[in-house]
Every structure is written in C-alpha cells, then in structure tokens.
C-alpha cells in the first residue's frame, strides 16, 4: 500500500479522555444503538471562558450569543444557560427550546427572517429581535402597539456593505437590509420610539475573511454615526459569527494531503477518492483547473484566537484597529459564534457492520450510519475518524498495519459514501469495532440527519466527569446540577 495520508483530528484533553474510554463507548452503542451522538456540556462552558478572555484582553464590554443552530442538544444549551453567555435563536422552536432550557428572555436574541408566529412569541416574551428587513420592523412595531406590549429591543441586521477602498469586496447576502438602505429602517425607528428600543446594528458574514468583516464593521459605525445625528441612541455593534474551528492535529498532514490530492487529480499518483472525485479540482489536459471546495480544516487562527486577531484588524477607511474604534465609541460588542463555541463538544459514533474487499482491490467498510448522520463531507471538512476497537477483541501483536478504506453508509444508494475520500486507518477494522467522528458538535451531528429508509437517527447522550470516571445520561435528561441538586 502507498504511504498512508492521515488527517488526524485535533483532540483536546476532555474529548481525548472520552475517546480513551473504549469500554464506555462500546457499552453506550450496545445500549442505545448506532449511530450515537455524545455531547460534552462542560466543554461549552470552557469555550465561553476563552471568548471572555479576549473581551478582557481588549477591555471591551459586550455579550456572547451562542448560535443555537449549530446543534440541537438540550444538554449543551442548559449548560450554557448556567454560564454568562446568551443565545441566538433562529426559529420558533429554537426560541421555545432556549426558554425551556433556562434562558430568560433578556438573554435571548432572535435572528434570521421570521414567521408571524415566531415574531409573535419573540415580541410577547420580550427577547431581542435582530431585524432582518424593513417589513419585519414595521410588523414588529404594529404587534407591540396593538397588544400594548413593553418596548421590544431591536438590532438592525445590515448587509452588502460598500467598501470605499474597492480592494475589499463585500459579499452579497440574502439576509439583512442593504447598508445603503439603512435610512429606511431609521425612519421606522423614529416613528415608533415608544414601541421599539433601538439597541444597535448587526451583521453576520459567512466567511473567514477578516478584511471583509472589518469593512462591514466600519459600515456599521457609519450607520451608528447617522443614528446619533438623528438623536437616536444605539449602543451595540453585533459582528455575528464565523470564527471557525481548527479541526486537524497536524498542519503538515493537511499540506501533504492537499498537495497529493492535486497530484492525484493530475494523474501523477493513484486516486485518493472514489472515482477520482477532485473536490472542485479537475484535470484539463494536464493543467489543474477549478478551486478546492473544502473547509480549511487546518486553521490554527480560529475561534477565540481569530476573534482576537479580528479585533486587531485595521479597517480600510478608518485605519485603526476594530478594538480601538470600539473603545473610543464606548459601544458594546456582541458576537454570535456557533461552530466555534461547540469546538471539542461532541463525537458521533458508528458501528462497523462489514469489511469487504472488492475484486478491484478496494476495501469497503460499511457503517451503521449514513452520510447525513455525520455531514462532514457536505460541509467540506476532511478529517479522519478514530478507530475504537472492541475491548479485548485483538491483541497488539496482530500486526496488521495501516489500510486505506472507503467508508460507506447504510442507505441502499450508490451515492451513500460517508466521504468520497479514501480514509486511512491505523489497522484494518473488524465488524463490531466503532469509528468515532470527533469534534462533530458544530453542524455535523444533527443538522442534516433524517429518517431515509426508516433508519433511526442517532440518539444523543451527554457525558460528564463524575469524580475520576465518565458518567452519562440521555441528552434530554441532562441538567447542570448533580443528582442531589447541587450546581455542577
Ligand atoms: C449561522 C449563524 C451564526 C453562526 O455562524 P458560525 O459560523 O457557526 O459561527 C451566527 N449568526 C447568524 C445570524 C447565523 O445565521
């Protein structure tokens, strides 16, 4: 076999310790079936602390809003409710869920376009409404006035920021109001000062480009200045999410993998993917074309560190770091991290059902899960699963070495590959072994899961330390208190 090309996941101590408890992982999948999702509520609390340290370092005031859509877990949201973080919800049911998990309306913000029912419950409960459009703002004002509700706090979500320097292009978004039309929103706010408590402006850009975010930030400051000139008193700038996660343990593996993928696409080495799939790259008569459509899985500047560097970024028109601009204006800074706040917060387990060699020399490993149960591929994240052998099944002495396998799912579909990539495992797996897809709490474990073929979707459990060992409960039964009612 050619040299194995690993993409080992980055594991912090808590998640690594859980994966070391192979007895527990096998017991859990025996009891609750495969696939199985495990979340680590204490990790989300630790991650909140790391973002708070960045606020402290820059002496900034403001609030962290967890973007709930990254994971459906109750345990994570309940544990989060016991921290200083707030929550960003984007649907009627997420709002109900957040309220039921212990978030008071003061700590909830509703984002995205809203249904009438969603807007009604938001106004009734008095959560912050991050307003998507002028129509939504008018409807909200009418609701408050008709039912004589207390004034609702609002943020205005803006998009399509002009860049004065031209070199930074601002991407178009189907969300929010174009910054150039902000005056329309301010007119509405002016008219409804009694019913709308205007907090400030917001953006969320689904990009990792710091320059683009700095441009958007400066666009927000311009609108804030316009507000002050009109006698409105907003005090918050919300810069959304998109802080990112570093998925891989070893940057060199990522470099090697992507350059070998290029070689494979150009036919200079055997394929690294099923049927030579190129992840966006193609061979055009010996010339490489296309662009690699993958998440930069090795991303050392991500999460809180990316936040820190973003605050040090200088915008093009004002020329000073974002943090300085915030300090001078005394505005609060709100952020909405999703993926980055659930970094290291979970794992998806799948049982190996069959290991089959084809006459063509491929090795298929069929799993008791399918591609929608662990949607790494759909999100362009390439990362190896961890092989969790059945306890005591084989000795170290067996000596069979690394093997390249294709991971296939439990749907009767030619296309149901967990990944189109050839995955290298340290040993040939056997039926009954588990593969653990680590660090999948952000979007990969339950965002896309469905009931195709009546296959069960994964159950979810929360794991936590009890003294010197791991303990667990069903996700829905987790509360951040001990069985005797003390705080965790
Ligand atoms: C999805 C989303 C987020 C979170 O994005 P991440 O990339 O997961 O940090 C934040 N804000 C809004 C409005 C979103 O839609």
Image (cartoon, grey):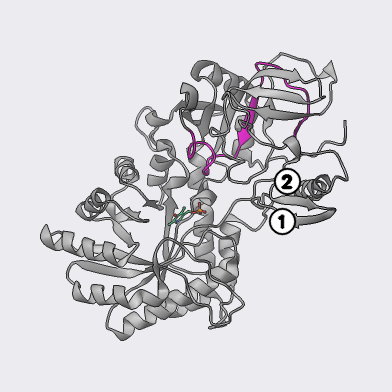
Q: Residue at x 73, y 46 (%)?
A: 278
User: Mark 1 sits on what residue?
Assistant: 290
Q: Residue at x 40, y 42 (%)?
A: 77
Q: Taken as a whole, is the magenta stretch helix, strand or loop?
A: loop
Q: Is mark 1 within 8 Å of ligand 1?
A: no
Q: Give the residues drawn in magenta, as a range.
A: 422-449
Q: Which label number is shown at residue 264?
A: none
Q: Residue furthest front?
A: 285
Along the viewing direction, whichever of 437 and 481 lies nearer the viewer: 437
Q: Position of residue 323 (x, y in %)?
A: 52, 73
- Residue 273 seen in the figure: no
| Label 1 or label 2, whichever comes before in sequence order | 2
Give the CA distance from mark 1 to mark 2: 9 Å
- Are the residues at dot 1 and dot 2 in contact (C-beta closer than 8 Å)? yes
129 sits left or right of 281 in the view: left
Q: Residues within 10 Å of mark 2 (few under 14, many from 20)?
A: many
Q: Position of residue 226 (x, y in %)?
A: 35, 82
Q: Residue at x 36, y 75 (%)?
A: 181
User: Mark 2 sits on what residue?
Assistant: 278
255 sits left or right of 300 in the view: right
Rendered view: 12 above or below 162: above
* Picture quarter with the N terminus: top right
Q: Secondary structure at mark 2?
A: loop
Q: Position of residue 446 (x, y in %)?
A: 48, 36
| Magenta residue check for 446 | yes
Rendered view: 70 above or below 423: below
Q: Position of residue 361 (x, y in %)?
A: 82, 24
Q: Residue at x 65, y 16 (%)?
A: 432
| Magenta residue check for 257 | no
Along the viewing direction, whichever of 271 and 92 lies nearer the viewer: 271
């Amino acid at each position: 076999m050619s040299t194995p090309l690993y993409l080992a996941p980055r594991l912090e101590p808590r998640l690594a310790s859980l994966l070391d408890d192979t007895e527990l992982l096998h017991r859990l999948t025996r009891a609750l079936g495969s696939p199985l999702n495990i979340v680590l509520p204490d990790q989300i609390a630790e991650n909140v602390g790391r973002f708070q340290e960045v606020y402290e370092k820059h002496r900034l005031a403001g609030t962290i809003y967890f973007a709930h859509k990254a994971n459906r877990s109750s345990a994570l949201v309940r544990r989060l409710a016991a921290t200083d973080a707030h929550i960003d919800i984007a649907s009627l049911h997420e709002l109900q869920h957040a309220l039921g998990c212990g978030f008071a309306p003061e700590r909830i913000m509703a984002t995205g376009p809203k249904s009438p029912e969603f807007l009604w419950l938001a106004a009734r409960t008095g959560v912050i409404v991050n307003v998507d459009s002028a129509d939504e703002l008018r409807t909200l004002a009418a609701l408050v006035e008709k039912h004589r509700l207390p004034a609702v706090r609002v943020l205005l979500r803006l998009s399509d920021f002009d860049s004065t320097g031209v070199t930074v292009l601002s991407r178009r978004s189907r969300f929010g109001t174009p910054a150039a039309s902000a005056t329309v929103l301010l007119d509405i706010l002016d008219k409804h000062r009694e019913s709308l408590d205007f907090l400030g402006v917001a953006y969320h850009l689904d990009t990792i480009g710091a320059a683009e975010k700095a441009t958007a930030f400066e666009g927000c400051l311009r609108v804030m200045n316009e507000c002050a000139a009109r006698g409105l008193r907003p005090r918050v700038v919300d810069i959304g999410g998109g802080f990112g996660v570093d998925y891989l343990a070893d940057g060199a593996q990522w470099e090697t993998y992507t350059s070998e993928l290029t070689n494979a696409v150009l036919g200079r080495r055997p394929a690294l993917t099923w049927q030579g799939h190129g992840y966006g790259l193609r061979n055009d008569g010996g010339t490489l074309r296309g662009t690699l459509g993958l998440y930069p899985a090795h991303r050392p500047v991500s999460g809180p560190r990316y936040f820190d560097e973003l605050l040090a970024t200088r915008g093009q028109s004002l020329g000073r770091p974002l943090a300085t601009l915030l300090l001078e204006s005394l505005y609060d800074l709100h952020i909405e991290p999703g993926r980055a706040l659930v970094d290291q917060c979970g794992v998806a387990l799948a049982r190996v059902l069959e290991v089959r060699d084809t006459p063509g020399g491929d090795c298929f490993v069929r799993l008791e899960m399918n591609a929608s149960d662990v949607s790494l591929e759909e999100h362009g994240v390439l990362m190896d699963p961890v092989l969790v052998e059945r306890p005591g099944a084989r000795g170290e002495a067996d000596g069979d070495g690394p093997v390249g396998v294709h991971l296939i799912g439990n749907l009767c579909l030619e296309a149901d590959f967990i990944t189109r990539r050839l995955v290298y495992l340290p040993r040939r797996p056997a039926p009954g072994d588990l593969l653990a897809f680590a660090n999948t709490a952000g979007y990969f474990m339950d965002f896309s899961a469905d009931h195709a073929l009546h296959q069960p979707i994964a159950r979810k459990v929360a794991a936590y330390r009890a003294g010197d060992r791991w303990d667990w409960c069903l996700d829905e039964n987790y509360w951040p208190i001990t069985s005797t009612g003390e705080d965790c």
